[in-house]
Amino acid sequence: MKDKKKLLLGIVLFGSIWGGLEALGINSMSSLGFPLKSPFLAATGILVLGAARILFPHRGTTFLMGLVAAGFKFLTLPQIFFCQVTAVIVQGMVLEVAFSYAQKRNLSTWFSLGTVGFLSMYVNYALFSLIETYLVLNPFWVEKGFSGVISYTFIEGTYAAILCFFFINIGFALGRSFAPVFGQWQALKAKAYGIATLVVSLGCWISGFALYR
């Protein structure tokens, strides 16, 4: 299987997995009455994308996976909530920059990677809320104004930052653990890899349609 095809399948696979886990997380937390969902969703995103970045260490892959996950939300939500779609795109974009920085600096210790995950969440939350307030002009955010940006960034953003300090490390560790097996599977069982990738991705999308309804 050609490298470009492997990469494309990987982007579809992990973007779909992230989208599917978001649907499952939202459904589960809503059932349990969780007051703050976004920090756990952010942690799920950094876990999946962190593992994927180790398996596909090419610049731009994290952002493209974010676009797949955003498309997942756009097509599976019963109503189109552009704020949710934007949140996924922004996180994919911020993590693309964060992971590229970590790769360039060859960061490998728990503390250094954790710091990248920690700080990236403040950027993520600040950027998302600023976009919604001043560019998209979402009425929910416009009503809150700049105080809403500050509150969201330093309250929910802090919870997300603490979780992501650990989850970026877990994601990278999972990626390193599975990388040898994953690479052999791609090389020796290319056809099976392609079929399994499409089946898992399709399963995530079907689950998304079911969970969001």
Image: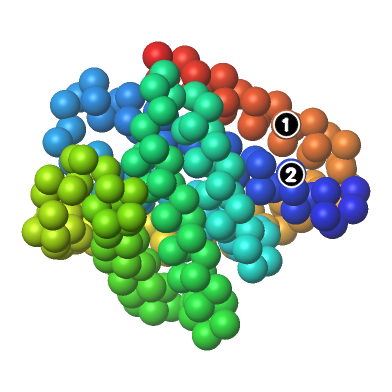
Residue at the image position 64 percent from the left and 32 percent from the top: 201
- Residue 17 located left or right of residue 36: right
**In the image, is residue 191 above or below residue 210?**
below
Characterize the local packing of mark 1: few (<14), some (14-19) or many (20 or more) Cα atoms within 10 angstroms: some
- Label 2 belongs to which residue? 9
Q: Kindly report the distance in space between the C-alpha atoms of the residues bearing marks 2 and 1.
A: 8 Å
Identify the image quadrant of the C terminus. top left
Residue at the image position 32 percent from the left and 62 percent from the top: 127
Q: Circle 1 sits in a helix, a strand or a loop, which is it?
A: helix
Find residue 188 and report its horizontal and vertical position in percent.
Answer: 88, 47
Amino acid type of the residue tagged 1 in the rendering: Leu
The residue nearer to you, when weighing 81 against 57, is 81
Amino acid type of the residue tagged 2 in the rendering: Leu
Observer able to see residue 47: no
- Residue 63 located left or right of residue 130: right
Q: Marks 2 and 1: CB-CB under 8 Å? A: yes
Quarter occupied by residue 139: top left
Residue at the image position 56 percent from the left and 57 percent from the top: 63
The residue nearer to you, when weighing 149 against 116, is 149
Observer able to see residue 45: yes
Residue at the image position 79 percent from the left and 31 percent from the top: 195
Q: Residue furthest bottom?
A: 105
Mark drawn on residue 99? none
- Residue 6 located left or right of residue 10: right
**In the image, is residue 85 above or below residue 200?**
below
User: First in sequence: mark 2 or mark 1?
Assistant: 2
Mark drawn on residue 198? 1
Find residue 61 and report its horizontal and vertical position in percent.
Answer: 63, 58
Find residue 24 and report its horizontal and vertical position in percent.
Answer: 40, 28
